[in-house]
Image (tube, grey):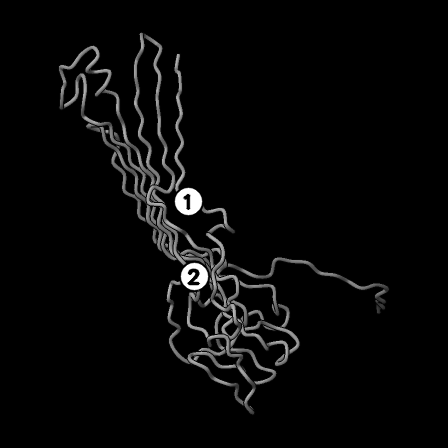
Amino acid sequence: MALTIWTQQISYLGSDASDNYNSLQVVMEKRFTKGYQFLAHYTWSRALGYDSDYYAIDPRLNYGVANTDRKHVFVLTNLVELPFGKGKTFLGDAGGAVNRIVGGWSVSAATSWESGLPFSPSYSSCQADRDTGPCRPNILGPVHITGSRNGYFTTTGGVPLQPNGTTGDTIGPWQRPAPGTFGNAARNSLRGPGFFQADLSVAKNLSLKEGISIQFRTDIFNLFNKVNLDNPIFPCVDCQAGGIIVNTAFNGAALQRQIMFSLKLDF
């Protein structure tokens, strides 16, 4: 008979959770013919995973949409050589100075459209209702997404949810959970603003002599100057600043319209 005596604490570290990803992916491509090409890619997907908060006690409580999940993603890139100049459809017999002016032009574009990133609603007094676990309220009705940076989704208007016997106070679609319980709002149950950006490039290629050419290029980033907003900085449903958006996407790094000019010499 063997006797085992533990003399120290044993720590275990392991990747015990699993993530799930399912998607529909569609690709359309037109290779370069007749001066035009494009590549379009669309993904409809859903990524699910766990959050470390409360995982050791009840993993399913924080199982939900992944923080990086974008339900729809569409990307289109295209290139067209304008049909002007020597050998082209229009002014095909142009030569000399005329061809140098009207020929060698091309236009390319890249467009990206993506649905918003998810986030979890919270409420202000969850610390008084429990000492651990996720801070999410109950949802009793539809939550309206206004799209406004001053109040992106339905809140209580800054009125705190109050305890009310065995059931919590209810304002609009939100209810304060009873003490010692967790709200039924799922992890990442709301989605923030979508993302859209279109970039355009116009290039002029000019051959100086055999083996030597120059290219003048104009790049316009965020052509339509679309303001891409980040998620609300306070997803709290009953705070004064609840639902307010103060940053642009990518932690404030989303571009507004920028124009860049460049000149390249090939030899």
Above or below, 96 relative to 146:
above
Q: Mark 1 — residue?
A: 256
Question: Total of numbered circles in the picture?
Answer: 2
Mark 2 surroundings within 10 Å by alpha-carbon count, few (fewer than 14), some (14 through 19), many (20 or more) = some
Left or right, residue 144 beside residue 166 = left
Between marks 2 and 1, how big is the CA–CA gap? 17 Å
Q: Position of residue 146 (x, y in %)?
A: 37, 66
- In the image, what residue type sits under mark 1? Gln
Q: At 64% across and 74% down in the image, what residue appears? A: 132
Residue 92 versus residue 219: which sits nearer the camera? Answer: 219
Q: Residue furthest bottom?
A: 165
Of residues 73 and 267, the one nearer the viewer is 267
Front residue of 240 and 53: 240
- Disc 2 + disc 1, Cβ < 8 Å: no
Residue 46 relative to residue 241: left or right:
left
| Local crowd size for mark 1, using a 10 Å CA cut-off: few (<14), some (14–19), many (≥20) | some
In the rendered view, would you say 189 is above or below 171? above
* Residue 242 position in % (x across, y down): 50, 69
Element carrying mark 2: loop
Q: Position of residue 152 (x, y in %)?
A: 42, 65
**Label 2 vs 1, first from the N-terminus:** 2
* Residue under the image location 48 percent in, 55 percent down: 68
Mark carried by residue 149:
2
Question: At label 2, which amino acid type do we have?
Answer: Arg
- State the mark number for residue 19: none
Residue 164 occupies quadrant: bottom right
Q: Is residue 220 left or right of residue 124?
A: left
Quadrant of the snapshot with the C terminus? top left
| Residue 14 x/y as whole percent | 65, 58
Furthest residue to the top?
210
Which residue occupies 32% across, 7% down? 210
